[in-house]
């Protein structure tokens, strides 16, 4: 019994620091995916509102793949494909690419809904005042639509932070993978899960709170 116990160590500050570093990596890949995915999603969402059947079908078909196929499968397939093609990427970049397009697929639908939520009468009024299409989008559609879809976007951002745990499947040492390593090392899964939950809370709460503050400011 004593011989078996010596293979495990107690959870120490070095292990907590290891989890902290993993939390930073989780935050890094999440921010990259959210920023890139949001920008792409806004463009795709805008394109989906244009009256071009061929363009709409093409974009919608591609986005449906990223929204419908489980993220874990996307990560493994993409990482394997780029390696077979002779362009291997690090786990961070493979994860960022897949998470970005996954995010873009969700944000595109949010953006489309936001643009379409602006009443036609408001847009006609803007055009009657002499605004161009670009001015209408900049000064009327985007400001009004953004307020309508902010809660949905916050939900997408929080989802991406949590879904980033799946990148561990391709070797990226984020919070989930770090917890697995420490659990094997210390066998103190309960304490580690508490720490993981705390770190995810610290990563997610600022995003949710920032969204609430922005909404409250817009309501004044």
Image (cartoon, rainbow, N blue to C red):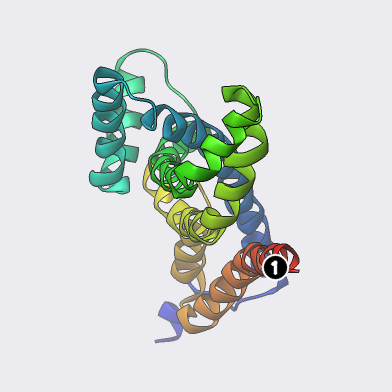
- Residue furthest front as drawn: 128
| Above or below, comparing residue 58 to residue 86 in the picture | below
Q: Quadrant of the N terminus?
A: bottom left
Kindly tell me whether residue 33 is visible in this rendering. no
Q: Quadrant of the C terminus?
A: bottom right
Say which residue label 1 marks. Answer: 219
- Residue furthest top as drawn: 86
Q: Looking at the rendering, which quadrant does residue 60 occupy?
A: top left
Dot 1 alpha-carbon crowd within 10 angstroms: few under 14, some 14 to 19, many 20 or more: few
Numbered circles on residues, count: 1
Q: Residue at x 65, y 25 (%)?
A: 130
Percent from the top left, x then y, of residue 131? 65, 26
| Above or below, comparing residue 26 to residue 43 in the picture | below
Kindly tell me whether residue 166 is visible in this rendering. yes
Left or right of 90? Residue 139 is: right
Percent from the top left, x then y, of residue 81? 29, 23
Assign a secondary structure to mark 1.
helix
Q: Residue at x 49, y 80 (%)?
A: 188
Percent from the top left, x then y, of residue 113? 41, 47
Residue nearer the viewer, 196 or 207: 207
Left or right of 45? Residue 13 is: right
Q: Looking at the rendering, which quadrant does residue 108 occupy?
A: top left
Residue nearer the viewer, 75 or 144: 144
Percent from the top left, x then y, of residue 219? 70, 68
Left or right of 59? Residue 95 is: right
């Amino acid at each position: 019994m004593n011989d078996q116990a010596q293979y495990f160590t107690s959870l120490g500050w070095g292990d907590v620091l290891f989890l902290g570093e993993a939390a930073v990596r989780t935050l890094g890949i999440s921010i990259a995916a959210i920023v890139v995915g949001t920008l792409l999603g806004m463009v795709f969402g805008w394109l989906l509102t244009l009256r071009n059947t061929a363009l709409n079908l093409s974009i919608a078909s591609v986005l449906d793949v990223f929204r419908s196929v489980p993220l874990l499968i996307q990560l493994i397939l993409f990482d394997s494909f780029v390696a077979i093609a002779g362009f291997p990427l690090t786990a961070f970049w493979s994860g960022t690419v897949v998470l970005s397009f996954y995010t873009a697929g969700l944000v595109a639908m949010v953006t489309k809904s936001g643009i379409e939520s602006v009443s036609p009468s408001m847009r006609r009024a803007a055009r009657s005042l002499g605004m161009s299409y670009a001015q209408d989008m900049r000064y009327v559609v985007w400001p009004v639509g953004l307020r309508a879809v902010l809660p949905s976007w916050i939900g997408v951002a929080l989802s991406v932070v949590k879904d980033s745990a799946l990148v561990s499947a391709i070797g990226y040492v984020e919070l989930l993978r770090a917890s697995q390593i420490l659990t094997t090392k210390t066998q103190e899964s309960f304490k580690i899960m508490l720490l993981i939950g705390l770190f995810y809370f610290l990563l997610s709460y600022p995003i949710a709170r920032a969204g609430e503050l922005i909404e409250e400011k817009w309501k004044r």
